[in-house]
Image: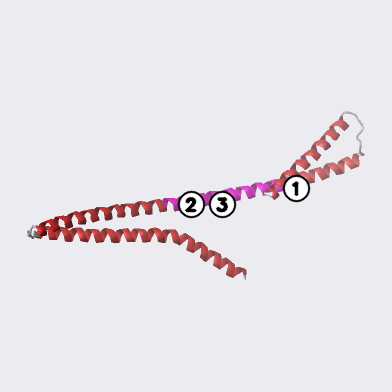
Amino acid sequence: MNDIAELERRIASALDRIARGVEGLGAAGDGEVPAAPEAAASEELTALQAALEDERIANAQLEERVRAIREKQDSEVAKLRAEAEEARAALAGLDSDLQRLRHANDMLTATNEEMRRALEENVGEPHLINKAMLAELESLRAARAADAAESRAVLGALTPLLAEAEARATTEQEAT
């Protein structure tokens, strides 16, 4: 940013010098005698043109830097948006699996309650045993799916961090 301020100051200074030179030439064209001899004015004009060209080059370089920074920023923003979308999708999947787990656990609890009441009445009902086993299997499957989704979410969060650490380590090794 200091470079930008310095370049802007230099451009403004060059434009001021050019304006003063043009005023001096305009005054000379009006029949007035210029303050400096014609050779000095010619040298000053050449110097001003060279300064203007230098400032144009500096301005072009500055514009190129700004364009490069803007492109880099845009690509970083796009990358961050994509990562955020992936994280949202992973969290939605995790939430779905957790809802499934809660439902399966509720079903298991209800079935176990029915079985307990049936056993208190000394009525062994095989369909309740089958229902309880199915509820328990579903609960285990849902718990496994929730664990897998949670693992994927953690792995998804760690992957960019590990890649960044690896890149940093590679850069440090190359520097030494």
Per the image, label 1 sits on a secondary structure element best described as helix
- Nearer-N-terminus badge (3/2): 3
What residue did someone put label 3 on? 72
Location of residue 59 with respect to 159 vertically, above or below: above
**Observer able to see residue 56:** no
- Spot the residue most to the front: 120
Q: Secondary structure at mark 2?
A: helix
Q: Secondary structure at mark 3?
A: helix
Residue displayed at 55% across by 64% down: 168
123 left or right of 105 in image = left
Q: Nearer the viewer, residue 111 or 21?
A: 111
**Residue range corresponding to the magenta coloring:** 57-85
- Image point 77% across, 39% down: which residue? 15
What residue sits right under mark 1 in the picture?
54
Q: Which residue position is annotated with label 2? A: 80
29 to the left or right of 117: right
Is-magenta flag for residue 64?
yes
Q: Amino acid at mark 3?
A: Lys
